[in-house]
Amino acid sequence: MAPMKKTTFRKPGDSPVKWVVLDAQDQVVGRLASHVAVRLMGKNRPDYTPSFTCGEGVVVVNCEKVVFTGAKWDKKIYRRHSGYIGGLKELTARKILSSHPDRILFMAVKRMLPKGKLGEHMIKRLKIYAGSEHPHGSQTPETVKLA
């Protein structure tokens, strides 16, 4: 008689958080954001559990040098509403990049993560920097090259 195989499920705090550094220079925003979202959720790991944050911490550098395909710099519009009459604000991607270069990638990744408490916990492990320097050397992050 064959022995029974046991399935093990992860519990919160089973393993320490691994950190990775991604260089966003000349990367397409949507493709980079989907790669970051998969790493934050932990879907690239064999012990992925949907109900826990088993993903990695991600540090993205050079986010001011991301690219859009086509004419999205001027045609892509980010909208927000204050809740008051006439409170709709519209900004193009080019204007957001000039004032806050990290927000384009942050919004793209946040919208790809699960909604609710789990997604809020995942997005806290995302650190985005406009330049090539970051203060996360003590976590000994591993540099990952994107194709």
Image: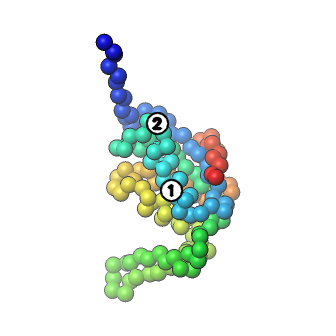
Q: Percent from the top left, x then y, of residue 138?
A: 62, 42
Q: Residue at x 43, y 36 (%)?
A: 47
CB contact under 8 Å: marks 1 and 2: no
Q: Is residue 10 left or right of residue 71?
A: left
Q: What is the number of callouts on the image?
A: 2
Q: Residues within 10 Å of mark 2 (few under 14, many from 20)?
A: few
Q: Residue at x 50, y 48 (%)?
A: 39
Residue occupying the far bottom of the picture: 86
Residue occupying the far top of the picture: 1
Q: Percent from the top left, x then y, of residue 2?
A: 33, 15
Q: Which residue is mark 1?
A: 34
Amino acid of disc 2: Pro
Secondary element under disc 2, as helix, strand or loop, is loop
Q: CA distance from mark 1 to mark 2?
A: 18 Å
Residue occupying the far front of the picture: 1
Q: Relative to the observer, which residue lies in front, 33 or 57?
A: 33
Residue 26, picture quadrant: bottom right
- Mark closer to the chain start, 1 or 2: 1
Q: Residue at x 63, y 58 (%)?
A: 24
Q: Is residue 130 left or right of residue 126?
A: right
Q: Relative to the observer, which residue lies in front, 132 or 22?
A: 22
Query: Vertically, is 4 above or below 47?
Result: above
Q: Percent from the top left, x then y, of residue 120?
A: 40, 54
User: Is residue 73 visible to us here?
Assistant: no
Q: Which residue is mark 2?
A: 46
Query: Vertically, is 105 above or below 1?
Result: below
Q: Residues within 10 Å of mark 1 (few under 14, many from 20)?
A: some
Query: Vertically, is 75 above or below 111?
Result: below
Q: Residue at x 63, y 46 (%)?
A: 144
Residue 73, picture quadrant: bottom right
Query: Vertically, is 145 above or below 103?
Result: above
Quadrant in which the N terminus is drawn: top left
